[in-house]
Image (spheres, rainbow, N blue to C red):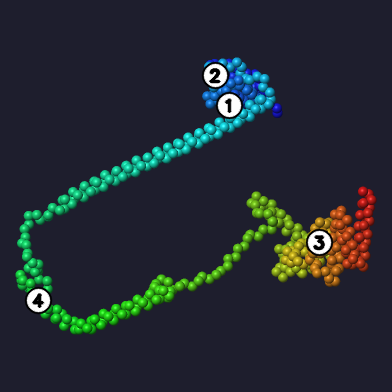
Amino acid sequence: MPAILVKDFTWRQTPEEIIIFVSLTGKPKKVDIFAIENYLKVSYPPFILELFLHDEILEDKSSCTLSEELAILTLKKLQEGREWPTLTLENLTKDDKKVFRIQALEKARLSAEKRAEKRSETRQLLQRKAVREQIELDTRVHNHIQELRDNHRREAMTQFDDWRQKAEVPICGGATGVLQENRKQYKTPVKWFKDSPDPEPSSKSPPVDALNNKQLSHKKQLGLPRANTREILENNNEEDMIRGKKIINDILNGKYREHNEIFDDTPRPRKCATINVNFSERIFPTPARESSQLQEQEWLVKQAEARRKCGFATEDLSQEEQDPQWLKDKGDEFLNVGNYLGAISAYTHGVKLSPNMSSLYANRAAAQYALGNYNRCAEDSSKALELMVPKCEGNRDSRARCHARLGAALCKLSAPQHGIPEFEEALKLAPENDTIRRDLEEAKHYFHLHNSNQ
């Protein structure tokens, strides 16, 4: 929708301000106002008011009052006391207006960048101030805690000093005693041993001869001469040195091991085992959903009943009947009597057990063709031809039948241009087969007739 220019506005001025009254059409819910120096724009789609002011204004000190039907713009003059002869500049061309718009946008961008920088600086200043205040607060708290600790420490030391002064006072302060000159004068107050005689007090030390006699008697009691004692000590030192050298050599060679009873009996390693994990059996290829469980069970029950009605159900097969060759023979029996659904079920189960058996695909293609499932017939015939390798005389007739059946299915699918080459290939493999020759002629006749009608 093109913009509609608004010209329904009035204005008046004071020595300091310009006041503009703009009528709002349609009671808009949102009004965008853009003012920068000498450019003013009021937008409320699809209406727009654009004014190229006569002089510059201070947008930071300007204000706007909105109501449902009126917008009052109070613009602060840059030069107070100066009277404007007109509100807007006159005789402006489109190029001049375009230049004014570009300049206004550039000034608005620069102003926004300056405001953003100022906000960033203010934010950083406040953050630094907050960090300083937090540090000061932590310091005050730390000092207060330290002061409390010092007070408690002083109180504890004061109590300890009081206790020590009281403890140093002698308990028996008024008691008196006799000072002994020598410890030998001390006499035991009781008799220590029953058989020992009471020692007599003596104020003189024993003579030197008595001490020597006592040492000699002690040596005689031991019964060891001084030379033998020295030899025993030397032998012990030599044994210790030999033992120490042996331990050091074992440590350097890595043969030394501290005796530790904890690791003497090493436990045998644990036996290995295999944990088999099986997933829940699910017939459908999609994930199981609780919301569709009843429908799936109903569908499986119906399919099982249908297989039982046609004479073949995989659930009823014994272990001996789970053989692809037996299933092929069973399918051939159903195919000969015209039970095509039973034949398809038998062949399909055989394919699950032996997916590389070409005769199962070839015979299932015949049953599919009899039921009119030409797409599946073509798929099974192609799969059978892929599995009939290498091509030899033993599988020539089977390959001819598969080519013929594939050509017939393609012709039934309205693609005789693809089915005729298959018939020709089948006729090359079995030139004596009149049925293939007759089908080829009918396909060519139909193809030429169809082309002539077009």
Give the Cα distance between marks 3 and 4. 132 Å
- Marks 3 and 1, the one that precedes in the sequence: 1
Please state the horizontal and vertical placement of residue 300, each as a whole percent of the image.
71, 56
Amino acid type, callout 1: Ile
Numbered label attached to residue 36 = 1
Instruction: Please identify, in this view, whether the residue under mark 3 or under mark 1 is nearer the observer.
Output: 1
> What numbered label is drawn on residue 17?
2
Between 26 and 361, the one lying in front of the other is 26
Element marked by disc 3: helix
Residue 388: x %, y % from top left: 80, 67
- Dot 2, how many residues are within 10 Å of its Cα: few (below 14), some (14-19), or many (20+)? many
Please report the residue visible at 56 percent of the width from the left and 23 percent of the height from the top: 57
Residue at the (7%, 72%) spot, across then down: 205
What amino acid type should be assigned to the residue bearing mark 2?
Answer: Glu
In terms of sequence position, does the residue under pointer 2 or pointer 1 come before the other?
Answer: 2
Question: Residue 195 appears at what percent x and percent y?
Answer: 10, 76
Q: Are marks 1 and 4 in contact (CB under 8 Å)?
A: no
Q: Nearer the viewer, residue 320 or 352?
A: 352
SS at mark 2 in the image? strand
Residue denoted by label 3: 382
Count of numbered badges drawn on the protein: 4
Instruction: Choose between 232 and 280: the one closer to the eye.
Output: 232
Residue occupied by mark 4:
208
Q: Is residue 450 visible?
A: yes
